[in-house]
Image (cartoon, helix red, strand yellow):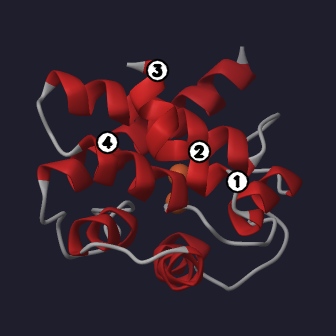
């Protein structure tokens, strides 16, 4: 399972734009690269259990927060409502995306983005992202 994950993830992780996420803090004590990898791994796990398109899940998850600013201190106003579109634009500079992969990135902040996820894969990444983010904050509070 780990081999399959890495064969999908490696080409993106080797890309300089994606690797550059290691320079940005995301949630307390974690870089954005840590975060997207964590979301990709857990989403892959659920994708396998639910027999979904794991290639789209891993690629979409690795690219879902592809933006280059410290969102707590800089970047556009209303970051939460806007960064999915920024990430999608940046992701298209990294690789070609299928419709499903684009939907995963575009809808990962649902329900903030009013349009709901179109594919089960998008819903999995959206829920796992919310779970991982919440866990980071709860853990850091203890
Ligand atoms: Fe995000
Ligand atoms: Fe995220």
Q: Quick one: quadrant of the C terminus?
A: top right
User: Is the CB of mark 1 within 8 Å of ligand 2?
Assistant: no
Q: Nearer the viewer, residue 2 or 107?
A: 2
- Which residue is under mark 1? 14
- Which residue is under mark 3? 2
Q: Is residue 43 above or below residue 113?
A: above
What is the distance, in whole Å, between disc 4 and disc 1 at their CAs? 26 Å
CB within 8 Å, label 2 to label 4: no
Quarter where residue 38 is shown: top right
User: Which dot, 4 or 1, sits closer to the camera?
Assistant: 1
What is the distance, in whole Å, between disc 1 and disc 2 at their CAs? 6 Å
Position of residue 25 measured from the top left corner of the image (x, y, whole percent)? 82, 51
Q: Earlier in the sequence, mark 4 or mark 1?
A: 1
User: Is the CB of mark 4 within 8 Å of ligand 2?
Assistant: no
Q: Is residue 35 above or below residue 104?
A: above
Along the horizontal axis of the image, is 44 left or right of 30?
left
Label 4: state its secondary structure. helix
Q: Residue at x 82, y 76 (%)?
A: 74
Label 4: few (<14), some (14–19) or many (≥20) C-alpha neighbours in 10 Å: some
What is the distance, in whole Å, between disc 2 and disc 3 at their CAs? 11 Å
- Which residue is under mark 4? 127
CB within 8 Å, label 2 to label 3: no
Position of residue 129 measured from the top left corner of the image (x, y, whole percent)? 44, 44
User: Which dot, 3 or 4, sits closer to the camera?
Assistant: 3
Along the horizontal axis of the image, is 110 left or right of 91?
left
Along the horizontal axis of the image, is 87 left or right of 119?
right
Using the image, tell me which numbered label, if any, was put on residue 10: 2
CB within 8 Å, label 1 to label 2: yes
Q: Nearer the viewer, residue 57 or 113?
A: 57
């Amino acid at each position: 399972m780990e081999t399959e994950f890495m064969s999908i993830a490696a080409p993106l992780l080797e890309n300089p734009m994606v690797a550059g996420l290691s320079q940005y803090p995301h949630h307390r004590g974690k870089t954005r690269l840590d975060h997207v990898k964590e979301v990709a791994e857990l989403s892959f796990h659920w994708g396998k259990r639910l027999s979904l398109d794991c290639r789209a899940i891993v690629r979409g998850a690795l690219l879902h927060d592809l933006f280059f600013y410290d969102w707590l201190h800089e970047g556009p106003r209303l970051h939460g409502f806007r960064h999915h579109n920024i990430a999608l634009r940046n992701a298209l500079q990294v690789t070609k995306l299928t419709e499903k992969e684009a939907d995963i990135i575009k809808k990962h902040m649902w329900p903030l983005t009013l349009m709901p996820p179109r594919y089960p894969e998008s819903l999995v990444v959206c829920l796992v992202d919310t779970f991982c983010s919440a866990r980071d904050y709860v853990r850091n509070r203890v």
